[in-house]
Image: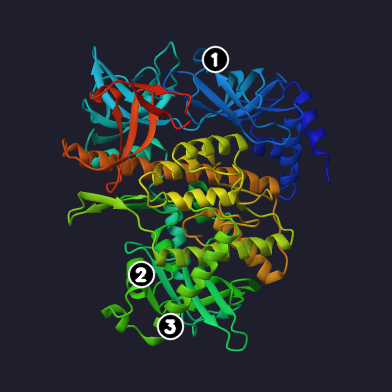
């Protein structure tokens, strides 16, 4: 194999060398497709050694300063910002403060190169100066159009820039004052200078709920239209599907299999069956997951588009899917009565829920019955209800077995130290015309808990199986929290009456969560712990999932809507077919970083749109009173969330006229003290 480090350094030494992207450089050096992963590893090593660096637009160039690092920039409203380092081999993670005059024209999400002035320590941020924009997060922004002095201007949403953007002559693209518009930046603004852009789309009047929703989607750069070549490939795959072709597949069509999903679900990617072995009395759980990998060719148009999106995005009354509906709602959806291809995980448990064995197969099923969560909860909690009496005895028996096994697994999971944060999501309610009529907190009842336990069991089983074969794969990891953050949480809990004997003892955390559930302070306690925990991410690193108390965990059960699951399916499928499978850690690390970022983008979109819908609803109900729970305290007032209605807001200290108050900053809970 060629010495790629030497080849790259020789290229740098040539006078005619011009910085190019990694793939272009590889092509210039004659690197084959098979050798490209080795080339990438050599390049990463050179970057870690300071012998190469990223330049603008992610080109590769000879080193400038050895004290420069690569990271992601985040700007604050004040104009200052921070850069968090990108995890590269040999580069320590850290956070660097960037002054407003040392940020060039970087904006949120940009990948930048920072000249380090002071390295970060355990207690303090580092300090740095952005010297180059390596890669723009986006050049597309959303804002409100207005006119001044005969000039068209756009004020970008979210306080991203200090100045509005010049978009040329008034009325471009038919924009009118107070319209929401999408612009493409030609020149990014700085602290001193206004930027320049061009309007690419007029969305409509600011304040219209539909316009505001699409504004958030556009501002986050979420693609909501599939290219024609992607749709064409989906049509070809669909036309080629034959129900009678079970070659190489285990036939599970005689098994009693059901699906349980939300009432408004459009894609069904998991189905389950539970049996009891008459000889051993062991539980036999089979989790069937839509075999999306069978229909999505690696490197094809469908695959590349899904990889770019990373995840489906679930918004109020709208889903932006990862795959076209021919796949997500049709061919790969486990619809009742239709033959569908699946990846199947068959797990044998003792009567007490201990795993005895696992088996995996490429299979085919025909779901006997489709349920929604509400139906199953009613049947299991009210066995004499009409729906329960109308059930086929075979299906009724299956639901009972599912409940019994699910609760055994749930009890066992908590016994090993799993944490359950009670942070129910807001669920909007609509009338026949789609207008918001109210909202409530999501319910986590027995039907949800059953499916949750089965999906967790399947995810763990697949991760354990791949790990036992020493195959690098994309895990779902949740690093343990910093002890200092847990200590702060313990102080906060103590103020609320929950004393902890050991701040790092997960069973003590579990006890406090359980004791506060159902109490007025539930949200405050659970949210405080959530803020103490790190984010779960996708990574090939062998790390635990802290919240689940799991040593081996991955995402396997939702390949229709999550690309990491599809990646795991491909490796498992290869293992089933050939007994062998591989994975490149560097490539998996890059994929994990991308998918984690896309996941956060989707969550931001959902959160912001739900918040916007709630605010629009409440805007027409000024003066309405509701019971609320204090969720946070600051010097300027306190935050409160409706006890029944899932909206949160600020009660400013100026409105507390019944007494004099001052903020006790020494208390971690942030008490407002009357004086």
Up the image or down, 177 lies above or below 462; here it is: above
Of helix, strand and loop, which one carries label 1? Answer: helix
Residue 377, disc: 2
**If you read the primary sequence from the N terminus, does the residue marked by circle 2 or circle 1 appear first?**
1
Are the residues at dot 1 and dot 3 in contact (C-beta closer than 8 Å)? no
* Identity of the residue drawn at 47% across and 60% down: 560
The image quarter containing residue 285 is: bottom right
Q: Report the mark closest to the observer, 2 or 1.
A: 2
- Foreground pick, 147 / 66: 66
**Label 1 – label 3 distance at C-alpha:** 67 Å
Image location (x, y in percent) of residue 452: 48, 63
According to the picture, the residue beneath numbered tag 1 turns out to be 102
**Label 2 – label 1 distance at C-alpha:** 57 Å
The image quarter containing residue 8 is: top right
Which quadrant of the figure contains the C terminus? Answer: top left
Of helix, strand and loop, which one carries label 3? Answer: helix
Of helix, strand and loop, which one carries label 2? Answer: helix
| Disc 2: CA contacts within 10 A as few (<14), some (14-19) or many (>=20) | some
- Foreground pick, 242 / 646: 646
Image location (x, y in percent) of residue 199: 33, 29
Up the image or down, 11 lies above or below 228; here it is: above
According to the picture, the residue beneath numbered tag 3 turns out to be 397
Q: Is residue 242 visible?
A: no
Image location (x, y in percent) of residue 402: 47, 74
- Foreground pick, 84 / 674: 674
Q: Is residue 89 visible?
A: yes
Residue 81, disc: none
Q: Report the mark closest to the observer, 1 or 3.
A: 3
């Amino acid at each position: 194999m060629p010495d790629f480090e030497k080849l790259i350094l020789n290229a740098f030494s040539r006078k005619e060398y011009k910085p190019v992207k990694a793939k272009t450089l590889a092509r210039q050096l004659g690197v084959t497709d098979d050798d490209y992963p080795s080339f990438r590893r050599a390049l990463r090593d050179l970057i870690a050694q300071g012998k190469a660096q990223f330049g603008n637009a992610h080109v590769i160039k000879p080193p400038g300063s050895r004290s420069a690092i690569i990271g992601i920039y985040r700007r604050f409203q004040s104009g200052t910002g921070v850069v968090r380092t990108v995890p590269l081999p040999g580069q320590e993670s850290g956070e660097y403060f960037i002054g407003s005059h040392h940020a060039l024209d970087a904006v949120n999400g940009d990948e930048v190169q920072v000249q380090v002035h002071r390295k970060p320590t355990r207690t303090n941020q580092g300090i740095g100066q952005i010297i180059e924009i390596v890669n723009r997060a986006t050049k597309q922004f959303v804002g409100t159009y207005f006119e001044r002095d005969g000039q068209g201007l756009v004020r970008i949403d979210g306080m991203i820039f200090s100045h509005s953007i010049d978009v040329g002559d008034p009325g471009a693209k038919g924009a009118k004052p107070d319209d929401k518009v999408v612009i493409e930046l030609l020149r990014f603004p700085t602290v001193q200078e206004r930027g320049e852009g061009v309007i690419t789309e007029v969305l409509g009047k600011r304040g219209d709920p539909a316009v505001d929703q699409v504004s958030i989607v556009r501002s986050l750069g979420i693609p909501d239209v599939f290219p024609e070549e992607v749709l064409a490939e989906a049509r070809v795959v669909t036309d080629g599907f034959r129900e009678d072709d079970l070659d190489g597949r285990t036939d599970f069509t005689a098994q009693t299999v059901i699906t349980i999903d939300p009432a408004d679900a459009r894609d069904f990617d998991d189905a389950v069956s539970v049996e009891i072995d008459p000889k051993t009395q062991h539980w036999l759980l089979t989790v069937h997951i839509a075999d999306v990998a069978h229909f999505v060719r690696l490197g094809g148009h469908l695959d590349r588009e899904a990889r770019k999106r990373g995840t489906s995005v679930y918004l109020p009354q709208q889903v932006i899917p990862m795959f076209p509906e021919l796949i997500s709602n049709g061919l790969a959806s486990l619809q009742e009565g239709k033959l569908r291809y699946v990846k199947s995980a068959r797990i044998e448990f003792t009567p007490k829920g201990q795993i005895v064995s696992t088996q995996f197969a490429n299979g085919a099923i025909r779901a006997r019955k489709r349920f929604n969560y509400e139906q199953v909860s009613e049947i299991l909690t009210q066995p004499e209800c009409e729906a329960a009496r109308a059930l086929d005895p075979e299906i009724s028996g299956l639901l009972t077995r599912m409940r019994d096994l699910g609760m055994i697994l749930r009890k066992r999971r908590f016994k090993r130290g799993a944490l359950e944060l009670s942070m129910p999501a807001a669920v909007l309610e609509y009338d026949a015309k789609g207008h918001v009529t109210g909202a409530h907190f999501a319910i986590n009842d027995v039907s949800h808990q059953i499916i949750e336990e089965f999906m967790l069991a399947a995810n763990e089983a697949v991760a354990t199986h791949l790990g036992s074969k020493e195959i690098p794969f994309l895990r779902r990891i949740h690093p343990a929290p910093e002890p200092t953050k847990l200590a702060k949480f313990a102080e906060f809990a103590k103020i609320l009456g929950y004393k902890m004997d050991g701040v790092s003892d997960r069973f003590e955390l579990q006890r406090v969560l359980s004791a506060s559930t159902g109490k007025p302070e539930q949200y405050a306690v659970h949210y405080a712990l959530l803020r103490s925990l790190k984010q779960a991410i996708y990574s090939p690193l062998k790390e635990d999932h802290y919240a689940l108390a799991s040593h081996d965990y991955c995402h396997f059960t939702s390949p229709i809507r999550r690309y990491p699951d599809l990646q795991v399916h491909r490796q498992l499928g290869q293992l089933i077919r050939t007994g062998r499978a591989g994975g490149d850690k560097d490539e998996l690390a890059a994929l994990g970083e991308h998918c984690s970022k896309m996941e956060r983008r989707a969550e931001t979109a959902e959160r912001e749109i739900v918040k916007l819908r709630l605010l629009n609803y409440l805007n027409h109900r000024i003066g309405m009173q509701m019971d609320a729970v204090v969720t946070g305290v600051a010097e300027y007032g306190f935050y409160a969330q409706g006890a029944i209605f899932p909206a949160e807001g600020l009660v400013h200290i100026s409105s507390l006229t019944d007494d004099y108050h001052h903020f006790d900053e020494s208390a971690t809970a942030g008490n407002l003290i009357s004086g």
